[in-house]
Amino acid sequence: MKYKTGEETKMKIIDSAFQLLAEKGYDAMSIDDIMKGAGKTKGSFYVHFKNKEDLLYEVIQMRLDRDLDHIVEETFKELSNETCNVQLILKQLMHQVHLGSGGVDRELWTAAHYQMVVLSRKNQIVREWMSKQYHAWSDFITKIITRGQDLGQIRTDIDILVMVNMLISLLEGYELRSIVDPDIDVYEQLKLTELFCTNQP
Amino acid sequence: MKYKTGEETKMKIIDSAFQLLAEKGYDAMSIDDIMKGAGKTKGSFYVHFKNKEDLLYEVIQMRLDRDLDHIVEETFKELSNETCNVQLILKQLMHQVHLGSGGVDRELWTAAHYQMVVLSRKNQIVREWMSKQYHAWSDFITKIITRGQDLGQIRTDIDILVMVNMLISLLEGYELRSIVDPDIDVYEQLKLTELFCTNQP
Amino acid sequence: MKYKTGEETKMKIIDSAFQLLAEKGYDAMSIDDIMKGAGKTKGSFYVHFKNKEDLLYEVIQMRLDRDLDHIVEETFKELSNETCNVQLILKQLMHQVHLGSGGVDRELWTAAHYQMVVLSRKNQIVREWMSKQYHAWSDFITKIITRGQDLGQIRTDIDILVMVNMLISLLEGYELRSIVDPDIDVYEQLKLTELFCTNQP
Amino acid sequence: MKYKTGEETKMKIIDSAFQLLAEKGYDAMSIDDIMKGAGKTKGSFYVHFKNKEDLLYEVIQMRLDRDLDHIVEETFKELSNETCNVQLILKQLMHQVHLGSGGVDRELWTAAHYQMVVLSRKNQIVREWMSKQYHAWSDFITKIITRGQDLGQIRTDIDILVMVNMLISLLEGYELRSIVDPDIDVYEQLKLTELFCTNQP
DNA sequence: CATGAATGAGCTTTCATTCAT
DNA sequence: TATGAATGAAAGCTCATTCAT
């Protein structure tokens, strides 16, 4: 069909752009490429987006924002339980993040994420978005850790901010590594986290 | 004299390219830009390099290769000492890496490193170089850990490969984070490492 | 009602196009711009006009044609009077032209007029239209001057065609000048005309 | 030859642009067109000019600036003569202007001039340049008129500024007219000027 | 009548690369 | 070695025009 609804085409463009962003990076992906991926011609790109930068922000919004809201809500339900196992919750959470959200291919997501890191050097909006993401994650994990400490399940001899930063950086470090070195077993690695954070008998 | 004439220009080009690579990325840096930074004109670029890709590989070789040879040698000397403190050696090593090698500005180096990560998705040579780097590091740190375990200073209840991967990933995760969030205190974070790896009384 | 529905939109488009034509010129005004000014969307432009050129001709017809017919008729009535003051009629006429016809903002009209001059270089239809305009004006003013000479009010020692051309060119020259240099006092300038054309005692 | 001196190519580009500017106007002339006229390919345009606007300003400088300096100097020499004929000087001057300066084809120059008038609506730099041009002309002609009045050759009953404006506007009006209506005899028209300005016996 | 998605040609500009000097 | 003019391909973007709805 020649004339679809605008929203459908827009989504196809965003999907195609996300793919190419992960594969080649923002500068290297051309609008021609993107539109070829979306099955439309170049000219029609500008029906849906003001310009290439505009598209980037929409891709971030639609495909890269780890939509915390849902995870947060679910996790807090579990945490409110008097007999919850904070260790287990944390472990599941890390795995869930590692696996990717919303059915998006994890490897693609990771690659796109690191494209954002390098883009953040040139682009303030991207930088601010990333910073916001980090803080949201920090806040969220801080709450979990605190709950675990209250229940006597997480060690209290380490500064909580340092511990949270470590968890996030470790996860990111593993994912980064896995771009170059796909053999690394992130699941195995994540077991360590448990060991370090919990109260040892 | 540091550079021979002729070779001097080549070095200036590599320096300028390294700077721009870190700031803007491979695709976004133009040969015009690079040569402006080197104080020469565009045309003379091709006297020194076959093409832009060729330059990339020279930059990698000259400015990004953490030249392990020297560090390795020095460290092994220390390790051979019967009363060496493996914890301390490891700590110094991590800090040294974090501070940057050869007087290069650390932030620049880190940024360039992550540009390599994203480039490795498109470019097999870069990918292979990075893989080689990781393995050299792994091997090196494995040896240190093993020595520490022999001396009873490092815990032995964790798989050694897992521990090494953790150390590397953690360091990378911190550096990655510091691109977006320069406030993070990597020195403080690295203290944790010590805590986790050593034999607790 | 001023416009019938449907015809109303067409008029709005013509108004918007006239405005933009004066401000930016034919090439620089886009159909998108025009329709934004008319409060409708791009697609509906082609309901009312065959293409952009077609619109131009309608703008010329509706907004740029100094509709002489009415002026001519009125003026001839005055001229037929045995005791008419030809000087005064001429003066009023020049002022009327300068002020603009049909309540259109004079400055806009002038700007649009000079857009037509440059367009006439490329477009034969515009060129012919302008030529026709000039000749209609020439004929009209010739008749007035002749009547003035008959009444002994206008000097007869100058070739009548030369005098008419002078009057028209002077008026145009002033208006042209006022585009760049809005400070010029066209009213004051026009007084000269009177001085030159009348029989001095 | 493939590799000329830069200045030669630059001049060819300016010449080609001037031609096209007069024929089609700034917006309608493409860099492809210009370079075809200059006998070079599009890409090389940017070796010589920063962008299209930059070229416009160079064209103005090189081809449109009526280089007054020389004319002014020559005229002042004549005016200093005690027995000079100011009428004649003025007449010669007007003809010289009308014929064009520096061997440039007059019709082209005139067309380009009116392109500048319409451009001045959008572009402040052009507007300022035109304004400066007008004032330089005004000053110059004022001086001539004053000298003529001192010698009793030019009438003194008209405000001098008004008279100067009239002379300039009249000349411009004639040239403008001649774009649309090439039959007009500007030389004949200019005789009028003499009649109006001189002291009648 | 009006909408807005789609198109393709064409625009300005950038850039890696070549080459005569 | 170094220069900078020249090239051609490709980039982002605009726009007149068409057409299904």
Image (cartoon, coloured by chain):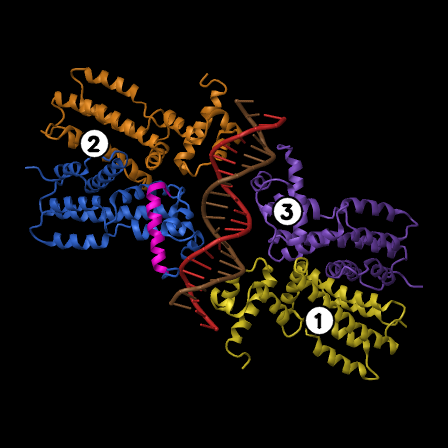
Chain colours: A blue, B orange, C yellow, D purple, E red, F brown
What residue type is disc 1 on? Val
Quarter of the image for residue F5 reads top right
Q: How far apart are marks 1 and 3 (CA)?
A: 35 Å
What residue type is disc 3 on? Tyr
For disc 3, the neighbor class at 10 Å (few under 14, some 14 to 19, many from 20) is some
> Relative to residue C64, is residue A66 drawn left or right?
left
Query: Dot 1 corresponds to which residue?
Result: C97
Query: Main structural element of the magenta stretch: helix, strand or loop?
Result: helix
Q: Distance between the residues labelled 3 and 2?
A: 62 Å
> Which label number is shown at residue D57?
3
Q: Is mark 3 on a helix, strand or loop?
A: helix
For disc 2, the neighbor class at 10 Å (few under 14, some 14 to 19, many from 20) is many
* Dot 3 and dot 2 residues touching (CB under 8 Å): no
Residue closer to the observer: C10 or B180 = C10
Quarter of the image for residue E7 reads bottom left
> Which label number is shown at residue B165?
2
- What x and y, as percent, mark residue D52? 58, 47
For disc 1, the neighbor class at 10 Å (few under 14, some 14 to 19, many from 20) is few
- What x and y, as percent, mark residue C200? 88, 71
What residue type is disc 2 on? Asn
